[in-house]
Image (cartoon, grey):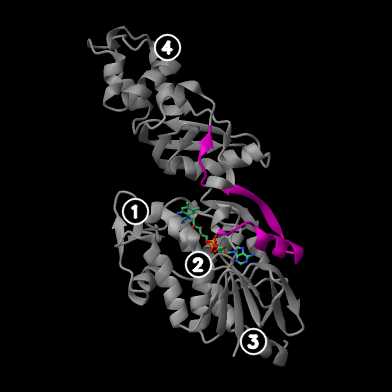
Amino acid sequence: MTRVLVIGAGAAGSMAAVFAATAGAETVLIERTRDGGRKILISGGGRCNVLPARVDESRFVTDSSPNVLRKMLRAWPLAEQRSFFEQTLGIPLVEEVESAKLFPASHKARDVRDGLLQYATSKGVQLRMQSRVTGISPERSGWGVTLEDGEGIQGDAVVLATGGLSVPNTGSDGAGLGFLAALGHEIHPTYAALTPLTADAPAFAALSGVSLPVTLTARSAAHASRAQGGFLFTHHGYSGPSVLDVSHVAVRGHLGQAPRARIEVQWTALGDAEWEKALAPHGARTVTGALRNALPDRLAAVLLDQAQVDATRVLAELRRDERRRLVDVLVRGELPCTGDEGYRKAEVTGGGVALGEVHAATLESRRHPGLFLCGEVLDAFGPIGGYNFLWAWATGRAAGIAAAAHRARAAAITANPA
Ligand SMILES: Cc1cc2nc3c(=O)[nH]c(=O)nc-3n(C[C@H](O)[C@H](O)[C@H](O)COP(=O)(O)OP(=O)(O)OC[C@H]3O[C@@H](n4cnc5c(N)ncnc54)[C@H](O)[C@@H]3O)c2cc1C
């Protein structure tokens, strides 16, 4: 029987352990925290957005080949993943229609974390909690894993699922990336992604707490991203799904991995032509009145100020240059941004092990047979909406199945080297 050691009982590692054990391997799941799956617990505001209701693969971000990424994702299609949670784990999912997100019907993230780990143990997975791995090394016939207290554990194959660098108090501190770099893998530079942005714009700071749906476009010479969705002014800057979704472009600009980014905001659903019409020069309505239906009053006042338009001006008296400036601010306003909240608040880590370092179908390292990688250690992340669990579940399952088959595959190759 193949003995598989899975390191990290987060989303990807727990799924890998389930499928390794289901495929018949003796499976040990090694986790540094007391209980594992802590990001699952805090995900979706404690409700766990398990999956998206629909997938747009083009929204994933990687510096590796998008084709390889798609191949890895498609190995476990969304409908099958959904069925695994509902039929196999017995956790019914419901769609939040306005956001196209799937949540457990109980709206309790704990049900997902506990359901997954209980199912793993029911399949025979041995849990080793409070066991921090400090090193992994290839041995003559398999792999050795060293724990913090010096204990060594041997296995035929290792699945490394230690996550990235985001929200380190959930247990992931980048240790796995260090092990993989030491073993010679190419690691693309890591950066915080899906993180709030900071700003030093006094007019906007006064709007803290105001929220509205917007469209954001972030661009640097190297990267671009566009997102529609909720936007929130905070004490320190901006948050909300649209901000998180484009934040990686700004973060990479701040880190100097790319030129500084510019973020444009379209504050309402109306474009140039619609606003030109809404602000047409007739009637006794004031500009403030014309903006009132489309924007929160306090934001409208700040935008009028930015466009240098008197808030009490009636539309009939609005000059063409004033209207032009106001439409520009409404449709292509600049979002001043000085930095980001970094890994402390980032929902995921961008960058990581180059996807070309693993075989797409098995997630096995091309450099070290018997070593399998899954989840956030790999160079890929998706937008808000369940995409990152989709990635963790898909890659975790594939790595678990392939690790369980490792001995048989290695024996077949030895017997038949051609
Ligand atoms: C606040 C927040 C909300 C989120 N909400 C959502 C959401 O609703 N939907 C969504 O799709 N995604 C969400 N995400 C992203 C999602 O949680 C991650 O993409 C996903 O958890 C990554 O899974 P992983 O298994 O690769 O890594 P992790 O979940 O980080 O798991 C890694 C595990 O490895 C363990 N570990 C690390 N190093 C060692 C070591 N040396 N020895 C032993 N164990 C180790 C850690 O303790 C941890 O348990 C959210 C993230 C955050 C931070």
Work out whether residue 93 or residue 64 is closer to the camera in this orientation and state it: 93
Residue type, numbered disc 3: Arg
Work out whether residue 39 or residue 312 is closer to the camera in this orientation and state it: 39
Helix, strand or loop for disc 4: helix
Q: Residue at x 51, y 84 (%)?
A: 23
Q: Is residue 339 above or below residue 202?
A: below
Across and down, in percent, residue 26 comes to: 56, 85
Magenta stretch in the rendered image = 171-198
> Is residue 46 shown in magenta?
no
Residue identified by numbered label 4? 321
Q: Is residue 380 visible?
A: yes
Q: Residue at x 24, y 13 (%)?
A: 285
- Label 3 vs label 2: CA separation? 30 Å
- Mark 4 Cα-neighbour bin, 10 Å: few <14, some 14–19, many ≥20: few
Across and down, in percent, residue 269 comes to: 34, 34
Question: Of the numbered discs in the image, which one, if any, rests on residue 407?
Answer: 3
Work out whether residue 101 or residue 324 is closer to the camera in this orientation and state it: 101
Q: Is residue 130 above or below residue 257?
A: below
Look at the numbered discs 3 and 2 and tell me whether their residues touch, using CB distance below 8 Å: no
Q: Nearer the viewer, mark 1 or mark 2?
A: 2
**Which of the two labelled residues, at mark 2 and mark 4, occupies the earlier sequence position?**
2
- Label 4 vs label 3: CA separation? 73 Å
- Label 1 vs label 2: CA separation? 30 Å
Across and down, in percent, residue 415 comes to: 71, 93
Quadrant of the snapshot with the C terminus: bottom right
Q: Quadrant of residue 319?
A: top left
- Label 2 vs label 4: CA separation? 62 Å
Tell me: is circle 4 under 8 Å from ligand 1.
Answer: no
Work out whether residue 262 or residue 232 is closer to the camera in this orientation and state it: 232
**Which of the two labelled residues, at mark 1 and mark 3, occupies the earlier sequence position?**
1
Q: Nearer the viewer, mark 2 or mark 4?
A: 2
